């Protein structure tokens, strides 16, 4: 077992990890998705004071976990441990924004979003509103 599982995440790290996970879920990390992640970290108040150098550390952690059989479960375990419940919908909104950033939703991204909804217990109605907002923001 590597040291990935002993890593403790901050709430901000958890949000970054979910965004990276959605981007990496279809095994094709697109520039639009990376730009979305970077701009979220640079602009959103929740990331005020966040160390941008953590982006690469968290990204590597997600990639390492994705290479392991139960990596997604481990990732959700780390996220649930670090992310306060009040940020669950924020996390889902950020994940949806990354998924929608390139204008297409791949099957793997849709499956991961479904898993995020389940793991973070996002209410169906709230999830639909969040998804609709993400779609509206990324129409071309």
Image (tube, rainbow, N blue to C red):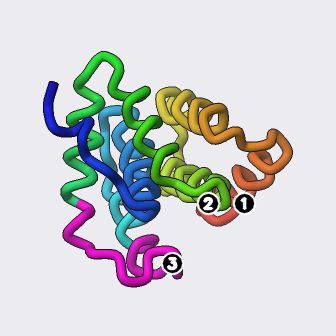
Q: Which mark is residue 14?
A: none
SS for dot 3: loop
Q: Tell me where residue 73 sits by quadrant.
A: top left
Residue found 43% across the figure and 54% down from its top: 14
Task: Give the mark, 2 or 3, whose residue is nearer the N terminus.
Answer: 3
Does 116 sit above or below residue 68? below
Residue position for label 1: 133
Compared across the picture, whether 59 is left or right of 136 comes to: left
The answer to if 40 sits in the magenta stretch is yes
SS for dot 2: helix
Asked if the residue under mark 3 is in contact with the one under mark 2, i.e. CB atoms within 8 Å, the reply is no
Coordinates of residue 16 in the picture (x, y in percent)? 39, 57
Coordinates of residue 3 in the picture (x, y in percent)? 16, 38
Pick the front one: 11 or 28: 11
Does 138 sit above or below residue 27? below
Specify start and end residues of the magenta stretch as a single range: 39-55
Q: Quadrant of the C terminus?
A: bottom right
Mark pair 2, 3: CA separation: 13 Å
SS for dot 1: helix
Residue position for label 2: 87
Task: Give the mark, 2 or 1, whose residue is nearer the N terminus.
Answer: 2
Coordinates of residue 42 in the picture (x, y in percent)? 39, 79
Pick the front one: 76 or 134: 76
Residue position for label 3: 44
Task: Give the mark, 1 or 3, whose residue is nearer the N terminus.
Answer: 3
Q: Residues within 10 Å of mark 1 (few under 14, many from 20)?
A: some
Q: Tell me where residue 67 sits by quadrant.
A: top left
Residue found 27% across the figure and 53% down from its top: 58
Q: Quadrant of the N terminus?
A: top left
Residue found 58% across the figure and 57% down from its top: 84
Residue found 39% across the figure and 36% down from its top: 75
């Amino acid at each position: 077992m590597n040291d990935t599982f002993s890593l403790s995440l901050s709430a901000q790290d958890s949000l970054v990890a979910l965004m990276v996970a959605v981007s990496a879920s279809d095994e094709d990390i697109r520039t639009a998705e990376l730009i979305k992640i970077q701009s979220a970290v640079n602009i959103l108040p929740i990331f005020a004071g966040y160390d941008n150098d953590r982006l690469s550390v968290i990204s590597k952690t997600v990639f390492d976990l994705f290479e392991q059989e139960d990596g997604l479960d481990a990732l959700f375990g780390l996220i649930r441990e670090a992310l306060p419940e009040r940020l669950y919908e924020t996390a889902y909104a950020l994940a949806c924004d990354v998924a929608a950033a390139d204008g297409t939703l791949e099957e793997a991204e849709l499956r991961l979003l479904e898993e995020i909804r389940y793991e973070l217990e996002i209410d169906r109605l709230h999830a639909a509103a969040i998804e609709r907002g993400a779609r509206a923001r990324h129409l071309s």
